[in-house]
Amino acid sequence: EIVMTQSPAILSLPPGARATLSCRASLSVTDYVAWYQQKPGQAPRLLIYDASNRATGIPARFSGSGSGTDFTLTISSLEPEDFAVYYCQQRSTWPPTFGGGTKVEVK
Amino acid sequence: EVQLVESGGGLVQPGGSLRLSCAASGFAFSRFWMTWVRQVPGKGLEWVASIKQDASERYYVDSVKGRFTISKDNTRNSLYLQMNSLRAEDTAIYYCTRDPVRRYDWWGQGTLVTVSS
């Protein structure tokens, strides 16, 4: 199975800062990567699919990039509601697999 | 509006069984793959099982093969997960998700399954 590795595990930033989250696949997944946001006590929410496409209703400050094995989720300017855990996921090969998550916390 | 509502979770002894249900509304249920994803509280996400629109294909994570069965009833707009021979490591929140090609665009609120004696 393809292993998805996210870094850093924890990202401490102030509101208004730019956040850059990384996700690396153990094999090429072309551009079949999605990103999810999860807040405490809530279900995950789809942010980005196929590496760079924003899901319905997702603000423009969220953007995704990458292909092959290296992917990035960027939050251009952190809003208070953006402090959460973020997961990447590949759909290139069965089984679908998730990264371990990056927690974005307030500095 | 899309809604997915899970039910059926609870406390069960090791070796026991549970059947999770997910009631779907707000979209054409018969046109979508559906998937169960689980999460140990405080930990990461794990894909568990997926089923094709017409139930002609089903896929499972290795750790549940032979013990769990995913099914769907397009007449009732419902997804199910029959879980047998439950183990402590199956303890998790189980989420029902809508699955347009192995990405999960809508999630239920989750139902907690606890396997413990």
Image (cartoon, rainbow, N blue to C red):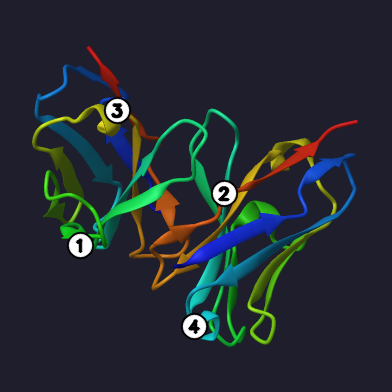
Return the x and y of residue A3 as percentages of the image width and height: 38, 46
The image quadrant of residue A84 is top left
Q: Which residue is mark 2?
A: B109
Q: CA distance from mark 2 to mark 4?
A: 20 Å
Q: Give whichever of A94, B47 is nearer the camera.
A: B47
Q: CA distance from mark 3 to mark 1?
A: 26 Å
| Separation of residues labelled 4 and 3 (CA atoms) | 33 Å
- Point out the image quarter for the N terminus of chain B: bottom left
N-terminal label among 2 and 4? 4
Q: Residue at the spot x=90%, y=48% of the render? A: B16
* Corner quadrant of residue B96: bottom right
Label 2 environment density (alpha carbons within 10 Å; few <14, some 14–19, many ≥20): many
Instruction: Give the vertical position of A22 relative to B75 (above or below).
Output: above
| Dot label at residue B28 | 4
Kindly indicate whether the residues beneath marks 3 and 1 are on one polypeptide chain.
Answer: yes
Q: Residues within 10 Å of mark 4 (few under 14, many from 20)?
A: few
What element does badge 4 sit on? loop
Q: Residue at x 62, y 56 (%)?
A: B62
Q: Report whether B85 appears left or right of B62.
A: right
Q: Chain of mark 1?
A: A
Q: Label 2 lies in what chain?
A: B
Q: CA distance from mark 4 to mark 1?
A: 27 Å
**What is the secondary structure assignment of the residue under circle 3?**
loop
